[in-house]
Image: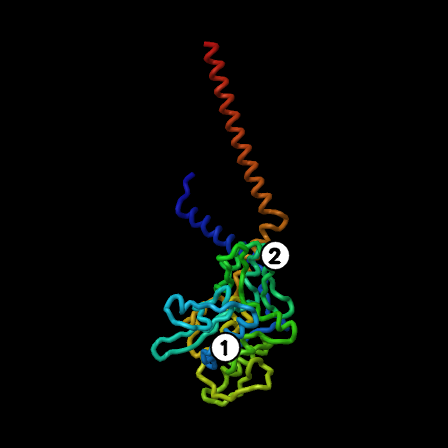
Amino acid sequence: MNIDRRDFFKIFSAGVVTASSTTNVIAREPKNRLKDAVGILYDATLCIGCKACEVGCKILNNKTAEHKIEKELGVPKSWDSASDLSVDTLNKIKVYKNGNDFSFVKKACMHCVDPDCVSVCPTTALTKNQTNGIVSWDIDACCGCRYCQMACPFNIPKFEFGKAFPELKKCEMCQHLIADGGIPGCCESCPCGASIFGNVEDLLQEAHRRLNSGIGEEYNFPISELESQYRTTKPISKYVNYVYGEHENGGTQYIMLSAIPFEKLGMPILPGQSEAVLSEGIQHTLYKGLIAPFVLFAWLAFGAHRSLKNESTELDTESDEKKGGNNE
């Protein structure tokens, strides 16, 4: 079959239009922040890098101290020296320095509004609480496929590769403490108000209040939680005029302020919509009414039928040739 240049572009254009239309049809509606969602506001301009949040996290979640500096650099008697997030370090303070630019940054699960990890999990081991929005993991439901690790745009879930019966580890915002009226260990341990806990919508308003305040203006920063009676008064620093997590990947419940552009702090630049909006729609469309298994079965049946038909034709031809030879 010959296809000229004009026909090629007609077919190509039709394919593009069809693909675009299919994508729009398959994509589901994005999810919105829950009214009672809780979260953390981390203000990097207040962080002094003391790592009290790391200590509080480990104590309240029964995590083991790591001694990488001792092993790798020979620095003795360190209490804990993890270099990054791991199965034993669910909350990590890192430092950025480039000339006169300097900042700390706190890494932990972002508790996305529309989490990719929950969307790809085939056994619903990862779920999002429909009241407070915390993303948690269920050991009894997990099959160990680690799809969540590949799907997370923030590279958060960690897997215990060194254990015979490995588990997945990530920050669950100390939900066991929140259930009893407490707050996350990182916020409770922070002495300078860099990490505060509260309702996410209220935290967003607090973040924008700080951005809209003048540089050098005295500000009454809360300690540990937004409604805390304990506060510290400090001048407002120069901020990047942006709240990280307000829109990234459809929004997160861990939001951040900084004086340094967030991409320099290692935070990924992400679209304002979760990949789950499209991927979940495709999965549900394919498996709705068992369309995908039916198509696979029909394709296998067709292949088997054609193979048997060809084999039968070859046997008939061979039989006719033998008969013709005998007649001769």
- Mark 1 belongs to which amino acid? Ala
Labels 1 and 2 touching (C-beta < 8 A): no
- Percent x, y of residue 29: 59, 62
Q: Distance between the residues labelled 1 and 2?
A: 33 Å
- Percent x, y of residue 305: 55, 32
The residue pinned by badge 1 equals: 52
In-image side of 227 versus 105 (left or right): right
At label 1, counting other C-alpha atoms closer than 10 Å, the crowd grade (few under 14, some 14-19, many 20 or more) is some
Is 139 in front, or is 302? 139
Residue at point 55%, 64% (across, down)? 115
Is 28 in front, or is 93? 93
Q: Is mark 2 on a helix, strand or loop?
A: loop
- Mark 2 belongs to which amino acid? Ala
- Percent x, y of residue 32: 59, 68
Is 48 in front, or is 255? 48
Q: Nearer the viewer, mark 1 or mark 2?
A: 1
Residue at point 53%, 36% (across, down)? 303
Residue at point 60%, 64% (across, down)? 128
**Is residue 72 something one can see in this rendering?**
yes
In-image side of 175 versus 151 (left or right): right
Q: Residue 141 has which mark?
A: 2
**Nearest to N terminus: mark 1 or mark 2:** 1
Q: Give above or below for 65 relative to 138.
A: below
Q: Give above or below for 271 relative to 232.
A: above
Q: Is mark 1 on a helix, strand or loop?
A: helix
